[in-house]
Amino acid sequence: MKIKIRKGDQVQVISGKDRGKRGDVTRGEVIKVLPKDGQVVVQGVNIRKKHQRQVQTQGRTVNPGIVEYEAPIQISNVMLVCPKCSKPTRIGLRRDDDQTTRVCKECGADID
Ligand SMILES: [Zn+2]
């Protein structure tokens, strides 16, 4: 399956434990796409904590403590939020001569 979500997109989480608490919707910016795993990392979503020992990386010392980080989630659990109509939408593709433009299926606007 071709991945239509890109880094920098706003997405809405549509399933999983991060689906809105109290009916709120969880939205965030895609900060990483992992095409091989079919996963994305979304800012502020699926926060995990890990205990960090003091380590040396590239000459820097990282202090021990609890580090919070966003774990990847399945791409099927997010929907793109259209920048034009700000609704979560499926993505259509429109093929012009040599490039493909993503299109919002809600309002029909070009997304790119
Ligand atoms: Zn739209």
Image (cartoon, helix red, strand yellow):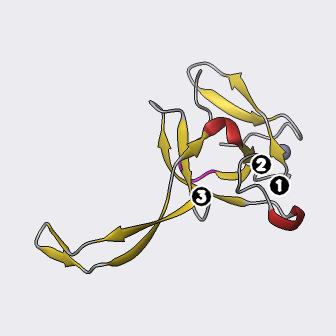
Residue at image point 26% right, 81% down? 63
Q: Is residue 52 above or below residue 36?
A: below
Q: Which mark is residue 86?
A: 1
Q: Which mark is residue 46?
A: 3
Instruction: Estimate the spatial distance between the alpha carbons at disc 1 and disc 3, rounded to whole Å.
Output: 22 Å
Q: Is residue 25 above or below residue 112?
A: below
Q: Main secondary structure of the magenta part?
A: loop
Question: Badges 3 and 2: C-beta atoms under 8 Å apart?
Answer: no
The amino acid beneath tag 2 is: Cys
Q: Which mark is residue 82?
A: 2
- Label 1 CB less than 8 angstroms from ligand 1: yes
Badge 3 crowding class, 10 Å Cα cut-off, few under 14, some 14 to 19, many 20 or more, is: some
Residue in the foreground of this view, choosing between 108 and 50 = 50
Q: What is the secondary structure assignment of the residue under circle 2?
A: loop
The amino acid beneath tag 3 is: Asn
Image quarter where the N terminus lies is top right
Question: Badges 1 and 2: C-beta atoms under 8 Å apart?
Answer: yes
Residue at image point 66% right, 31% down? 101
Q: Is residue 93 above or below residue 56?
A: above
- Label 2 CB less than 8 angstroms from ligand 1: yes
Badge 1 crowding class, 10 Å Cα cut-off, few under 14, some 14 to 19, many 20 or more, is: few
Q: Which mark is residue 11?
A: none
Q: Is residue 96 above or below residue 31?
A: above
User: What range of the chain is rendered magenta?
Assistant: 5-9
Q: Quadrant of ligand 1?
A: top right
Whichever of labels 1 and 3 marks the residue nearer the N terminus, that label is 3
Instruction: Estimate the spatial distance between the alpha carbons at disc 3 and disc 2, rounded to whole Å.
Output: 22 Å
